[in-house]
Image: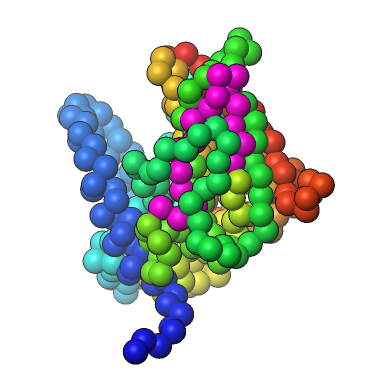
Amino acid sequence: MTTTEHHTPTAAGSGSSASAAFRAAARTTQDVPPERVDTVARAVLRGVHQAIREHDVTYPEFQAAKQWLMDVGEGGEWPLFLDVFVEHVVEEVAARTQDGTKGSIQGPYYLPDQEKLPWQASLPMRPGEKGTPLVFAGQVRDVDGTPVAAAELDIWHADDDGYYSGFAPDIPDGNLRGVVVTDGQGRFEITTVRPAPYQIPTDGPTGKLIAAAGWHAWRPAHLHLMVRAPGYRTITTQLYFQGGEWLDSDVAEATKPELVLDPRPQEDGRLRATYDFVLERG
Ligand code: DHB
Ligand code: FE
């Protein structure tokens, strides 16, 4: 006999899953030339030294920081922490040389190799998946306006409780994730549910820092997308919802005005949002 229990994701759970996903991505560690390491590492340390001088940081504060850094590592929270507080600036620098649809951070919850789906499809979801049904439709074009056929829209998002499959207990693998392939005219029409805002787990070191500093831990509701096609530069981005909570105070600072959807109710009562993606060659 089993009892029905509601499992809330823990920071340790989502943190270590995010660490495992990062390692599994089997990225080839780039050989950074010594001059570059020297320049950047020196600049980072200079920033830390400056903060200590400017704010008269004490020994107890230094030891508290050391303890916290150890906790972040032991909890596997470096992907969470870095993607929330640092990635947006790396993206900002990458965006300097990017045309077409604006990018945004990837975050820690991408999982590769999800189910391939035709241009008109529902994302895999549980029977009776909670949340407002949402139809997300549009077209992929290149910068000249030519439709891009057979482009892949790799989409992933949180559920109506703000949790991601693969990183929270009790959600089936692949839930609200999929790779949708555009038709001959570059079109897609994806049925899913509207995600809820996401809160950084409050019970881990990242959450504790946020609470200790008196910040909030929220990101506005968002869809994650990676849009790719042979011969084009892949776009990694996120789309937000007009009027949504936290849109103006995203803890990850990853919103852009160009990336806000304005969903409207369709005749059948479901929400419909449209967005066209523009890819640059490369
Ligand atoms: C984090 C979570 C997200 O869903 C996201 O889009 C970006 C960052 C995080 O917890 O680090
Ligand atoms: Fe996210």
The reply to whether residue 1 is visible in this rendering is yes
Q: Is residue 26 magenta?
A: no
In this picture, which residue range is highlighted in magenta?
174-190
Question: Considering the image in quadrants, where does the C terminus appear?
Answer: top left
**Residue ID at (55%, 24%):** 183
Residue 32 in the figure: left or right of residue 11: left
Asked if 117 appears above or below 48 in the picture, the reply is above
Asked if 207 appears above or below 261 in the picture, the reply is below
Residue 155 locus on image (x, y percent) = 49, 42
Q: Is residue 182 magenta?
A: yes
**Residue ID at (60%, 12%):** 146
Instruction: Work out whether residue 124 or residue 145 is closer to the camera in this orientation and state it.
Output: 124
Question: Considering the image in quadrants, where does the N terminus appear?
Answer: bottom left
Residue 266 locus on image (x, y percent) = 79, 46
Residue 73 in the figure: left or right of residue 140: left
**Residue ID at (78%, 50%):** 268
